[in-house]
Amino acid sequence: MPGSISPLVGEIAILGTWPFAKPLELLERGFPAHKPINEQAAVACPPGEENYPRFYSDTAQFDKAVAGAADFEPSNEKLSGIVVPHHLLAAHLIATGFKAASGFSYKRIVILMPDHFRKANRPFATTSRGFDSELGLVPTDRDAVAKLLAANLPIEESCLFGRDHGIRALLPFVRHHFPDVPIVPVAIALKSTRADWDAMAEALAGVVDADTLVIQSTDFSHYLPQHEARRFDQQTLNLLASGSLEQLAQLRQPEHLDSLGALYIQTKLQREEFGAAPLVIANENAQQYGSAQITETTSYMVILFGGFGTAWNDPSPPNVGITYFAGDTNFGRAMKHVLIRDGAGEAVLDAVLSRTRGRSLVVNLEGVILPNVPEAIDDLTLAMPEDLTIAWLKQLNVAAVSLANNHAFDLGMSGYRETTRALSAAGIRWFGQGDVLELPGMDVVGLSDLDTNQARQVDLLTPELLDRLIRPDASRATVAFVHWGREYVDEPSGRERMLADEMRLRSVTAIVGAHPHVASGRIDAHAGGDVLQLYSLGNFLFDQSAERASGALLELRVFEQGTVFARLIPLPNLFDLAKQ
């Protein structure tokens, strides 16, 4: 964004090259223009107990970034943490993250940051000095800092904070949105270990409370062309979605991010002390900000930590595409009877739309749509009335349905044609076995390993069908919406694990499963985060009660550079809800 570019970046754009550093090296260092860097120089502390002086030469870049986010709606749920960049090239993203958290007050802010220039002698450093930021004074919580220094931690007091953009780029935003709130700065050395991070998370648990905001200052993939950075970003996003600290600890610096320790501590602290989950609302790359090809880029993310209930207002940027996926859906049998009861429809609609906010939904539609469903049809042949089905699909804002399942041909080819005719006439897109559904930023491929219910054929996914997952445009995400597994079993068998690996080899971004009628309840990341998998969504609208079945929604956020972040959203049993 032109309004967010710092004087340093502007001068790089004008001069093209610098005699002492590459442009992106300067961005990483974050120093003001006209000031060559001597990383070996000793860090000079201010005299006495004086505050650190101002770091940047003017306030214009901060004022513009803050003004650019002025119309952005803050979260109506109190956030316990945010992750923002520290390159001022991405100042608009810093402003976005701070604005999201600005709707509530805090009594303390913890800032986790990398020790960029390796000035700390120990794994961690902190400071009790305050800061004169470009927008005013930012005090330090001296008591909390003293508590960390007194803990059994490998930590030192250091003046590195006076020159490190990991904190200095954020302080004007702290001052603007949270004036007079004291901070607890924590710099994390590259040489620190997971044992160190665990110890710091434990120590910070004694500092944070419900009125603490934990800010993580982190830039992501470094020194790679965008197509490679996008792959590393996707791995990071997938591991964040899975919530696995074990896998997260295996990420690499600087390919994935510049402070793995900060991300680990933040994630663990949020989970164990706040019960909060991560939600990535932005993922961009420096390559997106200009037309010239950059050989060494940096990626940026904005991550919020909170509970994100059904009343949450979701303050995501408008350029993020959000689509929801739901599991087994059928409007026939007992389902049609309960949906027409007084008040039943409103309760079901509210339960769904409060979670999707009316955004596009893709479902696994099990059965045949008929103008008139014969009364004598048996229970294992799934058929649903056209008027009711189409009306409900439209009310739920279903953009497309998958017919790649074992009930789409319950009445043979004629029933399939009736189904596709009704959907097409209503303007609802459909896709079957091997078909590709094109959505903004991603391709969804329908696959089924099970054939018609009567024939009971299995193991249908051949290499030729799986090859449909190989898409021509690698900048678009690919989602395999696959019908597989065993009914009422929420774990994959060897067959599904083999298929998932075959899909990974075809560079699929995400595997989303249906058919078992029970939700697997977790997101898994395979191969170091290369592939995301939700084994089973379970039921969406299906006539099975909670004693037997369960369901969930999968939210997929697609960012402009082609990466995706997934979030699992539990659903109540909608059949039981309609019966109440």
Image (spheres, helix red, strand yellow):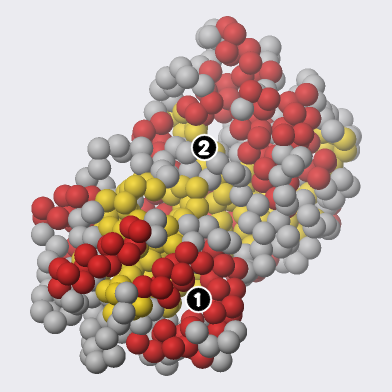
Q: Residue 186: x, y in percent?
A: 68, 48
Q: Which mark is residue 17?
A: none
Q: Who's the residue at 41% across and 73% down the image?
A: 387
In the picture provided, is 465 more to the left or to the right than 560? Answer: left
SS of the residue at dot 1? strand
Q: Where does residue 443 sit, x and y in percent of width and height?
A: 33, 48
Disc marking residue 571? 1
* Quadrant including the C terminus: bottom right
| Residue shown at 59% from the left, 73% from the top | 350
Q: Which residue is more in the foreground, 129 or 250?
A: 250
Q: Can you identify the residue that label 2 sits on?
A: 284
Label 1 environment density (alpha carbons within 10 Å; few <14, some 14–19, many ≥20): some
From this view, report whether residue 307 is shown above or below residue 134: below
User: Judging from the image, what secondary structure is the residue with disc 2 in?
Assistant: strand
Q: Quadrant of residue 135?
A: top right
- The alpha-carbon separation of the residues under discs 2 and 1 comes to 31 Å
Label 2 crowd (10 A; few <14 / some 14-19 / many >=20): many
Camera-side residue of 557 and 443: 443
